[in-house]
Amino acid sequence: MRGGAVLCVLLLSLAWLGRVWGAEGGEEDGEVVATEEEEGDEEDEVLSDELEEEDGVLVLHEHNFARALREHRLLLVEFYAPWCGHCRRLAPEFARAAALLRNGSEAARLGKVDAVAQTALSAEFHIEAFPTLKLFRDGNRTHPVAYSGRMDAEGMVLWVQRRAGPSATLLHDADTAAAFVSAQDIAVVGFFKDLRSEAARAFYEVAVEVVEVVFGVAEADELFKAYGLSADTVCLFKKFDEGRTDFPVDPERGLDVAELTRLLRVHSLQLVMDFSNETSGQIFGAKIPNHMLLFLNTSVAEQQALRDDFRAAASAFRGEVLFVVVDVDGYGATVLPFFGLKPSDAPTLRFIKMENNRKYRMEEDDFSAASVRDFVRAVLDGKVKPQLLSAEPPEDWNTRPVKVLVGKTFEQVAFDETKNVFVKFYAPWCTHCQEMAAAWEELGERYKDHEDIVIAEMDATANELENITISGYPTMHYFPAGPGRKMVEYRSARDVETFSKFLENGGKLPEEPPTVSKAPENSTESPSPSGTAEAREEL
């Protein structure tokens, strides 16, 4: 599963938080090769169709999968790999979700499949990354629903529950509607003249997906009158900001599911969000493309007073830029290294583009509403250059077998026209990077005296480059000698011999003659189209 928020969606899927230090989904992004030797070590087992459990989770395989579908109306299945770090971190939350569902007497169960061992099931359900979650309903094996919720127990329970029963509550009269709205901090009510209309059906689809909010539906004339409506409208009620936001249904276009989903998620957020463990899922789940951040120490009254102007600037950018307050002395302290900040730097402002993690700052912080508005507009209009982080180079960075690059030395080394430079971009917390570290050091030793080949590495969490975006760890790029600033991404096995073949062949692997052979009876088919098993998470 790609994403879901989450150091690790949802690192949190998704984001200035999730891409660097992790919270919700996992820590590293990378590709893991499952070798045939490892897979072949396991002894074949004769399995029956009995349904066994581990920690309340059904253990599924090709012999009992059909039975599980027959016996459980809703079955949420995790396809995992035993070696996948993301899967191991998900396991306790998945077990807790299973217990919560059973305690609530829900007609739903959770199951898991070892996708490395159960290759037939992996191929049938097109498993290409771990973990992948799919929901099977009413025994339907051909059209499972891809999981799209949060990666914590409560999020999984909400997601399943919303699909177990009606996604919206029918409101019969004004008293029922008033009680429904007042009982929630946020509630969405769809007012439709005809609950069988296309617009109403689209509304129900949205209600299934936006599980963090309760949905009601109404068609009675008295309710249209009570809420001052004359045509089909979706109303968002909230106990903050403006209190109510209406989304009229276009009589010609109807309701667009994706657009309404986006609008509800955007307007369910406070105009200015406080960054915390409780709100981080909302902040990144809304998928607002830009964030404007005010870093302050909330225990200092003078800094707290800066909120008013920050809020005044926010309303002009709702849906385009999310304004967030980060307490440098609280939960927000964990993100400071990602922005190159220390608690003593507060108060300060930063803008970040979620698409590429580019960060922007004012030449000199000015916290007035007008200045904040002008700065945000200038960034959106492309008039401000990004601020690029760079660590200081170690004193011996150029004398080691593996050269240690930082942002400020990268250009002179990688684009040296007399050298072929092979660079590993890594994250210190990435287990995939740690696993290949010895091979990279050995490669450095092998080529340390080579005339025109340089082996290097760069911590991509502490250093940023203007024209190169690193989207997963580890990533290897080859910069060939000569003019033209060329770059080749290395996407093959991570061992010294394959690295060497790549280098000796000028930045590409030599072609080998195809071999035709009969596959052994119990051969393992990789779940990835590229021939590798991936544990992939967006950074």
Image (cartoon, helix red, strand yellow):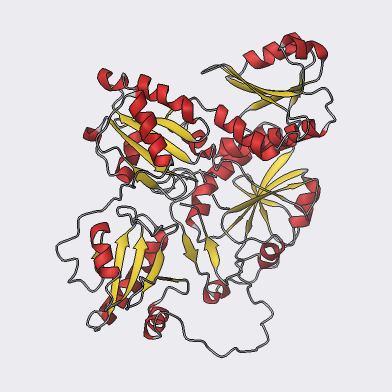
User: Image point 44% across, 27% down: which residue?
Assistant: 314
Above or below — where is 424 with respect to 255?
below
Above or below — where is 98 with respect to 452?
above
Above or below — where is 60 with respect to 21?
below
Q: Is residue 36 visible?
A: yes
From the viewer's perspective, tell me whether residue 259 is left or right of residue 89. Answer: right
> x and y percent of residue 325 in the render?
38, 29
Task: Give 113 or 53, whichever is nearer the viewer.
Answer: 113
The answer to which quarter of the image holds residue 187 is: top right
From the viewer's perspective, tell me whether residue 392 is left or right of residue 192. Answer: left
The answer to which quarter of the image holds residue 401 is: bottom left
> x and y percent of residue 61 in the render?
69, 60
Residue found at the very far left of the displayed protein? 395
From the viewer's perspective, tell me whether residue 348 is left or right of residue 68. Answer: left
User: Image point 43% across, 37% down: which residue?
Assistant: 291
Task: Give 373 or 223, whichever is nearer the viewer.
Answer: 373
Q: Is residue 275 visible?
A: no
The mark tally for this picture is 0
> x and y percent of residue 219 in the render?
81, 20
Task: Give 429 or 397, whichever is nearer the viewer.
Answer: 397
> x and y percent of residue 52 in the render?
68, 52
